[in-house]
Amino acid sequence: MVRSELKEVCGTDNLEKVKALSTITQPPSTNCKATIFLFNCECTVVIDTGAACSVMTQALADKFQLSIDHSAQEILLMADGTPQVTLGKVWKVPVLIKNISFPADVLIMAGNSNDTFVLGVDWIKKHNVIIDLNNDKASIPYKNSNISWDISTQVKYCDQLVGWAKEVSLIEVTAQTNTRSSS
């Protein structure tokens, strides 16, 4: 779809340049994931600098038998623009990294059946997390040292989410804008 829009923007005279775009390769990437432990169970989390707060699906909260400490129906705006209702907040969820607890205050999202846990900017700032995407590492200062652990942005499964809808929309809008401005 993007290639056809580029053909419109560039015109048929530049068709070879558009074809050459397919030769530029980059491994597919997805959101930043890490493995942590919750209540002695291994759990994959998304570390998301685009999420203002940490969130967990109701299904995952139920699996760990977490009870809501503060009931509040708030509406979160997701990355794809859809609103999501929350049930409330759970305080001090024990996120274990290398057997050390880095607690998170987590909003519980209603009506979602998958096991998703997102550590947002609130958690990242609270624990001074440093994310190094080039080396696939994250670290947290702890006492007189740094706790470091592996993160990944690599797509492992063919049906795994790649990128975000807003980025796709931005590409489409940019291509349409360039088409309009060139006419």
Image (tube, rainbow, N blue to C red):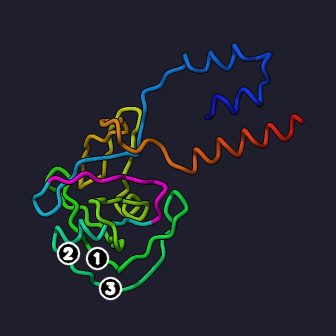
Secondary element under disc 3, as helix, strand or loop, is strand
Span colored in magenta: 42-52
Rendered residue at 41%/65% (across/down): 122
Residue 70's disc is 3
Determine whether, in the image, residue 159 is placed left or right of residue 84: left
Q: Amino acid at mark 1?
A: Val
Q: Residues within 10 Å of mark 2 (few under 14, many from 20)?
A: some
Q: Residues within 10 Å of mark 3 (few under 14, many from 20)?
A: few
Q: Is residue 157 visible?
A: yes
Cβ–Cβ under 8 Å for marks 2 and 3: no
Rendered residue at 70%/46% (across/down): 173
Q: Residues within 10 Å of mark 1 (few under 14, many from 20)?
A: many
Rendered residue at 76%/30% (across/down): 8
Q: Which residue is mark 2?
A: 66
Quadrant of image for the C terminus: top right
**Residue toward you, 64 or 149:** 64
Q: Position of residue 26 (x, y in %)?
A: 47, 25
Residue 90's disc is 1
The magenta stretch spans residue 110: no
Quadrant of res 3: top right
Secondary element under disc 2, as helix, strand or loop, is loop
Disc nearer the start of the sequence (2/1) = 2
Cβ–Cβ under 8 Å for marks 2 and 1: yes
Relative to residue 145, is residue 26 depicted above or below? above
The magenta stretch spans residue 48: yes
